[in-house]
Image (tube, rainbow, N blue to C red):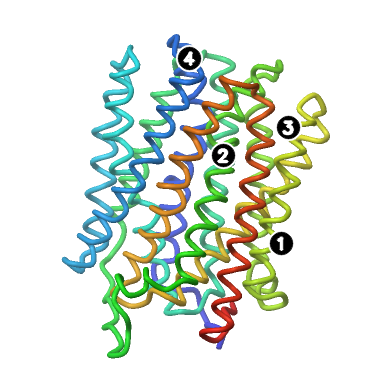
């Protein structure tokens, strides 16, 4: 049944998503250029960005467990927002690889929790009805577009040294937005609800997490290396920002129309299609770096390879992890995909960049996306065999 009105605290969710994912627009695309300006090698930069992903193995689970234990999700969200703001100060003083590594570890211990915590709060507010999920989540994409575009413009005017100041300001605004949230009651578990440990032993769950890990590992070719790859081929910082923004504008369009798309096609079809399209997207970037038109089309496909895939993943997690397990379910998703998948993918692609060529990482990423497709097919096969199929 469709909700008759917007969920409680809708404005607060939109505002927090704007600044939380605005940080993602200001930080990963440009911090790699900042590190390069500090004299770090592509391999060192790849390791630093992999630390960012590695902390997603630890952070979401630590903070998710804490939030569920205390039943104070908003308190944990505020604490991690404040912690990120303090930890980022070290970025202003870093000069060496080891110093930046320490800052990245501390910073991402806190920021890694913000996505899963806010998603769990939103899902609790939606009470199982995802009708408004996309239209609230799209404000994160709007923030991303705004920050990546304005940051690229400011950096072209004032230089790459402005990156830490922009990012610290965005983190401050995210912390201020977190203060607006009110705690929400957590639904009690059903008597027949399995434990987290029991869920992780189910073969369809393991296949699902394997697929999301491979997909995010493949996307590290974008998250870590896309800006460096474009800069290497002569694209300006503003154009780099514009190309990132193209992808997120397309993502916004998907989030807006998410409900009718899922209603028409279902979670299974949307997820499998997103994985196959990702295979082609990576090949387009690998072979078409000299063509702006090809890059624009490839970036527009971000609507599918991220927006559709992420939404289908959230819908699947929502089916398996509900009530008091909601936060830990989102944390496990973040850890398996962005944590394990992102770390391994980032380190492997860093090695491929150094051993072979920048172009080669997109060939490898295409292969990872194809493996993710087969893992997802296996997960859905087992879901249909052992339980009712996942639908939106």
The answer for how far apart the CA atoms under marks 4 and 3 are is: 21 Å
Which residue does the image show at 69% across and 27% down from the upper left? 359
Q: Which residue is mark 1?
A: 273
**Separation (CA) of disc 3 from disc 1:** 20 Å
Q: Which residue is mark 2?
A: 146
Element type at mark 4: loop
Q: Residues within 10 Å of mark 3 (few under 14, many from 20)?
A: many
Residue 74 image point, x, y percent: 26, 60
* Residue at screen point 28% across, 74% down: 324
Q: CA distance from mark 3 to mark 2?
A: 27 Å
The residue that label 4 is drawn on is 41
Q: Which quadrant, please, contains the N terminus?
A: bottom right
Quadrant in which residue 318 is drawn: bottom left
Which badge, 2 or 1, is on the more N-terminal residue? 2
Q: Residue furthest left?
A: 70
Residue visible at 78% across and 31% down in the picture: 287
Q: Secondary structure at mark 3?
A: helix
Residue at 54% across / 50% down in the picture? 214
Mark 3 lies on residue: 286
User: In the image, residue 52 lies at what x, y percent?
Assistant: 39, 36
Picture disc at residue 74: none
User: Which is nearer the N-term, disc 4 or disc 3?
Assistant: 4
**Which of pointers 2 and 4 lies earlier in the amino acid sequence?**
4
């Amino acid at each position: 049944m469709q909700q008759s009105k917007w969920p409680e605290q809708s404005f607060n969710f939109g505002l927090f998503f704007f600044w939380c994912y605005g940080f993602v627009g200001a930080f990963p695309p440009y911090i790699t250029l900042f590190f390069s300006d500090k004299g770090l090698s592509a391999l060192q930069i790849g390791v630093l960005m992999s630390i960012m992903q590695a902390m997603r193995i630890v952070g979401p689970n630590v903070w998710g467990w804490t939030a569920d234990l205390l039943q104070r999700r908003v308190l944990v969200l505020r604490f991690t927002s404040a912690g990120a703001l303090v930890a980022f100060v070290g970025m202003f003083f870093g000069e060496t690889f080891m110093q930046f590594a320490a800052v990245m570890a501390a910073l991402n211990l806190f920021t890694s929790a913000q996505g899963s915590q806010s998603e769990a709060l939103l899902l609790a507010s939606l009470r199982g009805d995802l009708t408004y999920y996309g239209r609230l989540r799209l404000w994160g994409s709007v923030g991303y577009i705004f920050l990546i575009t304005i940051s690229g413009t400011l950096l072209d005017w004032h230089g790459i040294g402005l990156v830490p100041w922009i990012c610290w300001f965005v983190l401050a605004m995210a912390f201020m937005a977190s203060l607006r949230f009110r705690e929400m009651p957590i639904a009690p578990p059903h008597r027949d609800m399995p434990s987290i440990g029991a869920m992780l032993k189910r073969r369809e769950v393991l296949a699902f997490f394997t697929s999301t890990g491979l997909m995010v590992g493949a996307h590290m070719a974008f998250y870590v290396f896309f800006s460096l790859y474009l800069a290497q081929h002569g694209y300006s910082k503003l154009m780099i920002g514009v190309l990132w923004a193209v992808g997120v504008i397309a993502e916004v369009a998907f989030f807006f129309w998410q409900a009718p798309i899922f209603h028409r096609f279902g979670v299974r079809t949307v997820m499998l299609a997103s994985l196959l399209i990702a295979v082609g997207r990576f090949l387009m970037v690998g072979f078409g770096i000299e063509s702006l038109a090809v890059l624009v089309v490839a970036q527009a496909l971000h609507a599918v390879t991220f927006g559709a895939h992420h939404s289908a993943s959230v819908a699947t997690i929502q089916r398996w992890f509900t009530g008091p397990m909601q936060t830990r379910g989102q944390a496990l998703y973040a850890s398996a995909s962005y944590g394990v998948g992102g770390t391994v993918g980032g380190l492997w692609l860093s090695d491929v960049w150094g051993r072979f060529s920048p172009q080669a990482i997109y060939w490898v990423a295409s292969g990872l996306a194809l493996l993710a497709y087969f893992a997802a097919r296996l997960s859905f096969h087992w879901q249909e065999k052992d339980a009712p199929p996942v639908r939106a």
